[in-house]
């Protein structure tokens, strides 16, 4: 018999283990240390650097996902453009910016907020049907306070002034359209993560262990968790005991979740999807583009594969990327093992995996086509965005590795889940995060959900509610329903994060 004791934690004695030193664990760690200053936190990371997998700047788009430009967040449903997902993501990104502003106040960030820069977020489409879609999307979004700064145009001259690279050499007279939002951002999630992990490492009662591989998780009879580890440098085998475990190991979370043997993990599977970029090597070309421009995804493409021509600032250096192109590996992490996919397959998820594959043949077809793209075919995709591109100015680089979550439906079949899944045991002693997009951009809202699920009594207490509102001033209120509060919050975070 297990004890339902999480909601009665003694903060002074609570042992917390965070597996993975990425953006999610870092965010949760800072939050819990603010809410429970006397708790003890152990962070275990397999690599020798924090934020080096999915959170690393070269392994993700760096887009502060706020639904300003991502057309996949506003699909047509029954003939109508649905902006409900866009509203949720935009609201959640405003929450993230508030928490990041709080990090500056508590000294978590050295100097200014060097991990985030303001940059226009733009959508670009071509052809009558796509232009009609973009205008309908714009009309619906513009009516909401979250998107009131968005601009729509079909004026080629204006678009050329914004996007000279994309318009120079563009032939034909087909209709084009563009939306632009000046409130967009570029975020170095790797830098943000490392700042938070370093801050945690300097706090009393926090231990950060790099180069430590978690081999197994076992629930003990008293409700605690035993974590079996190996120090990858010394090869020493270790054990730790925790009251609460969070698995934030990116693509590696699924295998660790299965090791926990919690019933809530049954039916979950995953399929790895890698990414590649074309990276510009010509400084003159890089300086001519100053926006994140997203187009429409190919039929069957996963959400993380929406094509975009993307200005990035990474560690103070300006870059230009195009992609991503999908790639395939049986690894669940960029620095994972080729056995990851096979180790994740168990009796409880074989049928969901097979049925999801059969039901999503366009995705399977898309991934196969992407894997076998020639160098010339990749470049043709770039030319659709940048007609005068010179192949000698671009190099192919490997981006991150993601795991597409497959979840068993009530009928027992598999469903692809394109968002983020939080899997928590019934006692609130273990929580794992599965999924990718929009991921890091909404990490603060996701971690607040984890805290609410796993510490329900504490979460609703006056003490915790007050502290959460210190971290996120708009907590408990809907910004898309309160224009004056939205303006106040945006002015505050723009000033604090130096976004202009």
Image (cartoon, rainbow, N blue to C red):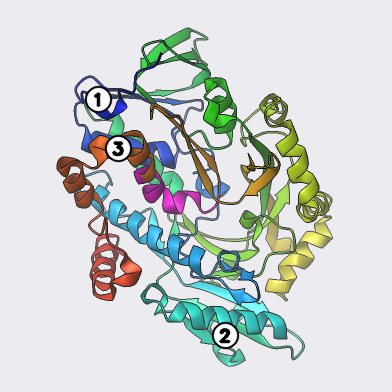
Residue at the spot 48% in from the left edge and 70% down from the top edge:
68
Whether residue 315 is visible: no
Label 1 packing within 10 angstroms: few (<14), some (14-19), many (20+): some
Residue 284: give its label.
none
The one nearer the camera, 409 or 432, is: 409
Residue at the spot 76% in from the left edge and 51% down from the top edge:
360
The one nearer the camera, 17 or 162, is: 17
Whether residue 262 is visible: yes
* Highlighted range, magenta: 437-448
Above-or-below relation of 30 to 174: above
Examine the image and state in which quarter residue 393 appears. bottom right
Circle 1 sits in a helix, a strand or a loop, which is it?
loop
Cα gap from disc 1 to disc 2, whole angstroms: 57 Å
Examine the image and state in which quarter residue 483 appears. bottom left
Label 3 packing within 10 angstroms: few (<14), some (14-19), many (20+): some
Residue position for label 2: 159
Residue position for label 3: 456
Above-or-below relation of 153 to 249: below
Label 2 packing within 10 angstroms: few (<14), some (14-19), many (20+): many
The image quadrant where one finds the C terminus is: bottom left
Cα gap from disc 3 to disc 1, whole angstroms: 11 Å
Which of the two discs, 1 and 2, labels the residue nearer the N terminus? Answer: 1
Residue position for label 1: 9
Q: Is residue 475 magenta?
A: no
**Residue 160 position in % (x across, y down):** 59, 85
């Amino acid at each position: 018999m297990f004890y339902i004791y999480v909601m009665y934690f003694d903060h002074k004695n609570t042992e917390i283990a965070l597996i993975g030193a990425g953006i999610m664990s870092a965010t949760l760690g800072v939050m819990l240390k603010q809410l429970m200053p006397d708790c003890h936190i152990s962070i275990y990371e397999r690599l020798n650097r924090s934020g080096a997998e999915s959170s690393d700047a070269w392994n993700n788009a760096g887009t502060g996902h706020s639904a300003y430009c991502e057309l996949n967040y506003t699909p047509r449903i029954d003939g109508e453009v649905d902006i409900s997902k866009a509203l949720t993501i935009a609201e959640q990104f405003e929450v993230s910016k508030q928490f990041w502003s709080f990090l500056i106040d508590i000294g978590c960030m050295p100097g200014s907020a060097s991990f985030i820069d303001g940059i226009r977020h733009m959508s670009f489409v071509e052809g009558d049907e796509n232009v009609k879609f973009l205008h309908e999307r714009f009309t619906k979004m513009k009516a909401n306070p979250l998107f009131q700064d968005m601009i729509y145009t079909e004026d080629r001259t204006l678009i050329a002034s914004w996007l000279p690279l994309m318009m120079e050499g563009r032939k034909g007279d087909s209709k084009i359209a563009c939306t632009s939002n000046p409130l967009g951002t570029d975020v170095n999630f790797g830098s943000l993560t490392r700042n938070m992990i370093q801050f945690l490492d300097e706090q009393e009662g926090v231990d950060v262990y790099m180069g430590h591989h978690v081999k197994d998780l076992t629930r003990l009879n008293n409700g605690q968790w035993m974590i079996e580890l190996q120090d990858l440098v010394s090869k020493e085998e270790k054990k730790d005991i925790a009251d609460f475990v969070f698995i934030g190991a990116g693509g590696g979370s699924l295998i660790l979740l299965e090791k926990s043997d919690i019933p809530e993990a049954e039916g979950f599977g995953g399929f790895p999807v890698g990414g590649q970029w074309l990276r510009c090597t010509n400084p003159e070309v890089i300086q001519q583009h100053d926006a994140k421009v997203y187009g429409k995804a190919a039929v069957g493409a996963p959400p993380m594969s929406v094509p975009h021509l993307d200005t990035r600032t990474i560690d103070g250096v300006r870059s230009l990327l195009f992609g991503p192109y999908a790639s395939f590996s049986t690894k669940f992490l960029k620095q994972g093992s080729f056995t990851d996919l096979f180790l994740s397959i168990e009796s409880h998820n074989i049928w969901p995996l097979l049925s999801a594959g059969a039901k999503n043949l366009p995705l399977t077809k898309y991934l196969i086509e992407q894997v076998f793209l020639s160098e010339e075919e990749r470049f043709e995709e770039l030319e659709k965005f940048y007609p005068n591109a010179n192949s000698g100015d671009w190099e192919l680089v490997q981006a991150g590795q993601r795991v597409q979550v497959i979840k068993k439906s009530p009928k027992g079949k598999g469903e692809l889940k394109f968002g983020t899944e939080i899997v928590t045991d019934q006692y609130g002693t273990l929580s794992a995060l599965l999924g990718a997009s929009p991921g890091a951009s909404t990490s603060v809202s996701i971690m607040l959900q984890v805290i609410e699920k796993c510490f329900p009594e504490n979460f609703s207490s006056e003490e915790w509610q007050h502290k959460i509102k210190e971290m996120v001033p708009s907590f408990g209120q809907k910004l898309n329903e309160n224009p004056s509060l939205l303006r106040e919050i945006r002015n505050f975070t723009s000033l604090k994060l130096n976004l202009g």
